[in-house]
Amino acid sequence: MKTQILSLLACCLLLTFCKTVPVTDAPKPAEQYNTTVEAPLVSTISIPVNISISDLVTSINNKLSGKALYEDYSYTDNNNDGFMMNAWKSRDITLNLNGQTIKYYVPLKLWLKKNLYVSEAEAEAEIGLSFKTTFAIKEDWSIQTNTVLEYHEWLSKPVLKTGMGNVSIESIANLAIGRSKKDLTQTIDRLVSQQLSLRPAVQEVWNALQTPTLLSDEYKMWIKTTPTGISMTPIVTDWNSIKAKISVDCLNDVNFGAQPAFRENTSLPLLRNIEYDNTPDEFQVRVATDVPFPEAERIARTFMVGQVFESGKKKVKVEDLQIWGNNDRIVVNTLLSGSFVGNIYFMGRPVYNAQKNQIEMTDFDFHFDTKNMLLKSASWIFQGTIKKKMKDSMIFPLDENIKALRAEIQNTLKYYPIQPGVVLSGTVDTLTVENTRIMPNSIRVNLFSKGKLQVDVKGL
């Protein structure tokens, strides 16, 4: 009986409380967004490529040392010439370049074997061959070459060793070389097309570039680059180097919070040709940086949930909050308990404070429907400090994030090996905020960066 009386008393007290503190929700501001579609923030990354000619020559000589450049073990090919011939590099190759043309001088050691019908005889000689190759990078990333043998000279003349003595075969060897030069130059073009296939290498870089990267675990900052086009200038040369510029058009996104969904990857497009003098030496990167509403809510809850605001004998406690957009403003739905139970709404316009490197709210106030309701039923809340506290909680520091982004990019660009012997380096000169706007799922800050890049090739 005593237990029943206590239960009845508790119910009466609860009903009394509910009568004195009813749940009162202010009219809810609509969730809506401007229909203006934001133009993609296209960035242009211009990368000057510098290949040292001396390094290139050294690399070529090292790779060709000890390797047969030409092998012929048949007497019946080349119009049944009756010769076998092998050739390998005997001295260092030299070359010079002019635009899309390479001229190179190749000293070769030759081994020849002649069919004398009744027997066979061998000969050795050394010859210098002068080649000219014109090349072009096609839009499908293949390399097209056309090689011709300009002239040859004997560094040691071929002498055939027979049982009856040594016989000079220079004229016959000249004839054999003349007949073989088409096969020789076609072999060079085939080897170049096989060994210098650009598409797999460019495809690998293209795919790797689009992998989302966690730049800061502390701030949960992710970045993704989505390239949309690629261009290349014709190759130019001077006495020391081969130069070209690669220009990449891309879209860059930075998001905060758990790994978000980014825009879809793109396929490697066809190569476009551009003029060398019309390509800038610096990169210009625009980055769309999003603070998702759930992340903004998490930050604001850290400061506000559990806060108690008092006025005389009355007090309220912040139980929860939720954030969404209303055109160019942010709506903060705040759930209160205590002397007032219900939802009230704040609104403000997010702006970027360049001096403090943070997103903060301007024109922050109670939503007018909330203000009207509180003036009628709970004006003591309207007159308290909750608005100021809420505004202060709606500050999203970007200083550390921007510094981390710039430091991470700068650190990467100090020395970034793309592949053995190919190094990307550069500097980030500026990183600034262009504007702030409300997106359907986030507060967006558009960043703009300028700097310089350079690709040095130390070997191939």
Image (tube, grey):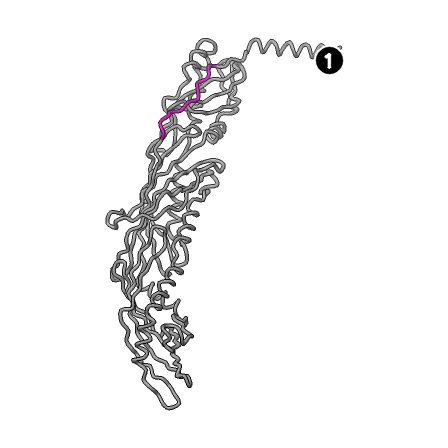
> Residue at the spot x=34%, y=79% of the render?
125
Which residue is more in the foreground, 226 or 11?
226
The N terminus appears in which quarter of the rendering? top right
**Residue occupying the far bottom of the picture:** 164
Can residue 262 be spotted in the picture?
yes
The answer to which image quadrant residue 94 occupies is: bottom left
Can residue 431 be spotted in the picture?
no
Which residue is more in the foreground, 159 or 404?
159
Which residue is more in the foreground, 435 or 37?
37
Element type at mark 1? helix
Q: Label 1: which residue?
A: 3
Residue 34 in magenta stretch: yes
Relative height, residue 233 to residue 72 (above, below): above
| Left or right of 49, for residue 334 | right
Q: Amino acid at mark 1?
A: Thr
The answer to which image quadrant residue 74 occupies is: bottom left
Relative height, residue 99 to residue 436 (above, below): below
| Residue 390 image offset from top left, x and y in percent | 44, 23
| Left or right of 119, for residue 433 | left
| Residue 14 image offset from top left, x and y in percent | 62, 12
Tag count in the figure?
A: 1
- Characterize the magenta stretch by its predominant secondary structure: loop
